[in-house]
Amino acid sequence: MAVRRITVHCVGIEDKPGSLQKFLAQSSLSGVDFLCFAAFSCGNNRGCVFVGAKEAAKFEAFAKEAGLGAQPATGFIVSGEDRVGAAAEALKGLAENNINGTAGSAMVIDGRYQMLMVVDTADAERAEALLS
């Protein structure tokens, strides 16, 4: 299992068709390149996007210029060979040590899983030690 610590930003968007695409298009025009993102509906016509940019400072400059309230958090990209229970095993240490994930997303491609796990920045050091 490989673990990569990244800065993740949480951004609020409208929850309507095209909002995520518009956000991604606008950020790309500013040269922001993403490692990952996870988007969720939050209710009341609001959506939440967790983004991990290859260059966090570039994303922060875009967010400031666009007037977005981007909240930083700590994320981990966890990857490994796919097998039954791989995600449960990867997250076991966090659960046993009372570290809450604020967002997550995973997928399997060609026999390997990639998982984004976001935690509160206050828990980042402990989470990194437990995931590694």
Image (cartoon, rainbow, N blue to C red):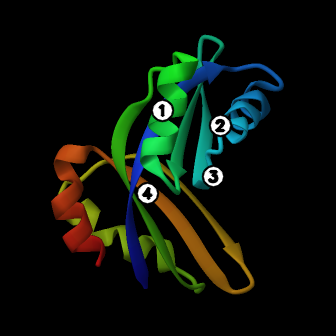
64 to the left or right of 16 = left
Q: Earlier in the sequence, mark 1 or mark 2?
A: 2
- State whether residue 49 is above or below residue 122: above
Q: Provide residue 43's location: percent of width, then percent of height.
A: 59, 18
Answer yes or no: do the residues labelled 2 and 3 have beta carbons within 8 Å?
no
Q: Nearer the viewer, mark 1 or mark 3?
A: 1
Residue underneath mark 2: 30
4 and 1 marks in contact (CB < 8 Å): no
Is 82 located above or below residue 36 in the figure? below
Q: Which mark is residue 61?
A: 1
**Disc with the residue nearer the chain's start (4 vs 3):** 3
Above or below — where is 35 with respect to 20? below
Q: CA distance from mark 1 to mark 2?
A: 9 Å
Q: CA distance from mark 1 to mark 3?
A: 13 Å
The mark lying in front, picked from 4 and 3, is 3
Give amino acid for label 1: Ala
Say whether residue 91 is left or right of residue 52: left
- At a point 53% along the width and 21% down the height, the residue shown is 65
Q: Do callouts 2 and 4 mark residues in contact (Cβ within 8 Å)?
A: no
Q: Which residue is mark 3?
A: 33
Helix, strand or loop at label 3? It is: loop
Disc 3 marks which amino acid? Asp
Question: What residue is shown at x 24% (from left), y 62% (from top)?
Answer: 127
